[in-house]
Amino acid sequence: MKEENVHDLKYREAKTPQGNPAAPLTQLFRLDGRTIVVTGASGFLGTTVAKSIIESGGDVVCLDVVEKPQSADWDEVQKAAKVHSRNVSYYQCNVRNEQGVAEVFAKFVPLLKHPIRGLVSCAGVSDNGPATDFPADSFRRLLDINVTGTFVVAQLVAKEVVKTGLSASMVFVASMSGYVSNKGVDTAGYNSSKAAVHQLARSLAAEWGSRVGVPLIRVNSLSPGYIRTAATAEALKKPGMEAQWVGDNMLYRLSTVDEFRAPVMFLLGDGSSFMTGSDLRVDGGHCAW
C-alpha cells in the first residue's frame, strides 16, 4: 500500500488563531481560564515558571520526580496562588515512565477547574565527562529524560487538548548547547539531547499546526544561555570558568532565572499566536558572535 503524504492539502486546514491577537497588549500575556502543565517544577526554572503562570492568571499542575518540592520555593508558589486566587497542584512522577505519567494525568485531569491549554517542559538533566570514557548508559539516560520524557508528557497533553477541541501552546526548554559546544566542559550527551529537543519541537509543530482533526497546538522551544543557579555553581568553581562563560556572550554576564519569565509567558500566551516550530534563544548573544 502506497504511503500517503500527511502534509498533502487534504490533511491540512487553517486554524483559528489562539486567542485574539488584536486584544489590548497586556492581555496577550494573560493565561486566564487555562491550566498549564509544568514538568521539572521543583527545579530553579520550573518553580519560577509556575509562579509566573499564576501571576499571569493561569492554573498550574506541577510535575517532578522528587516526592516533595523544595519547601521555600514551593511556599512562594503557593503564596502566589493564594494572592491571585489560582489553583496549583503538585504530583510526583518520572517522565521516563510512560505508564506512570499516564496514571498521574488520570488523577489530576478530572479535578481541573480549567482545561489544559499548555505545557512547559522544564524536566531535564545534565552530565559531563570525556567522550572516550562516557558510559553509554549515561548517554541514554540524558536522551531518555531530556527528549523522550518531553515527548511522553507532550503526547498526553495533546491527547487532552484533542478531547476539549481548544487550542494550546507548548514550550520545550532546550539550550543554546543545542547549537554550540560549551567551552571548558565535555558535554556531548547533553548537547546532543538539547539539539534533539529543538527538532522534536519543530516536528510536533509541523504535525499539530494544521492537521485536520487536531486542534491548533503550537510548539516552540526556549534555549537559555548560562544561568547563575545552584546547578551551575559547581562548574563555575573551575578556575577561569566564570570569566570564560561571561566573556563568551555579548552582555558580559551570566543570566538570572527571572530573565526567562517573560520569554516563557510570551510563548505560552496569545502574543505569539503566529509563532510555532521556532526556537527562542535567550543567551545574551552567546551564539551570535
Image (tube, rainbow, N blue to C red):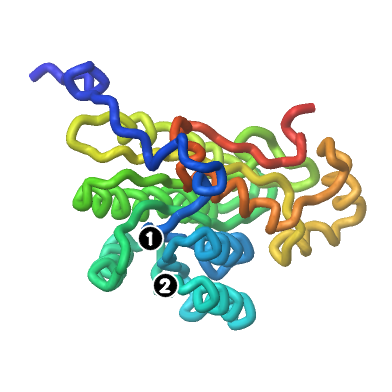
**Regarding mark 2 in the picture, which secondary structure is present there?**
loop
Q: Position of residue 274 (x, y in %)?
A: 45, 30
Q: Position of residue 225 (x, y in %)?
A: 70, 45
Where does the N terminus fall, quadrant-wise?
Answer: top left
Observer able to see residue 173: no
Observer able to see residue 53: yes
Q: Position of residue 69 (x, y in %)?
A: 53, 77
Q: Residue at x 45, y 36 (%)?
A: 21
Q: Position of residue 280 (x, y in %)?
A: 59, 37
Residue type at numbered disc 1: Thr
- Look at the numbered discs 1 and 2 and tell me whether their residues touch, using CB distance below 8 Å: yes
Q: Is residue 120 above or below residue 244?
A: below
To which residue does mark 2 refer? 87
Kindly indicate the quadrant of the structure image that contains residue 202.
top left
Nearer the observer, 42 or 190 = 42
Q: Which mark is residue 35?
A: 1
Q: Residue at x 65, y 46 (%)?
A: 224
Q: Residue furthest left?
A: 1
Q: Is residue 54 above or below residue 12?
A: below
Q: Is residue 159 above or below residue 218?
A: below
**Regarding mark 1 in the picture, which secondary structure is present there?**
strand
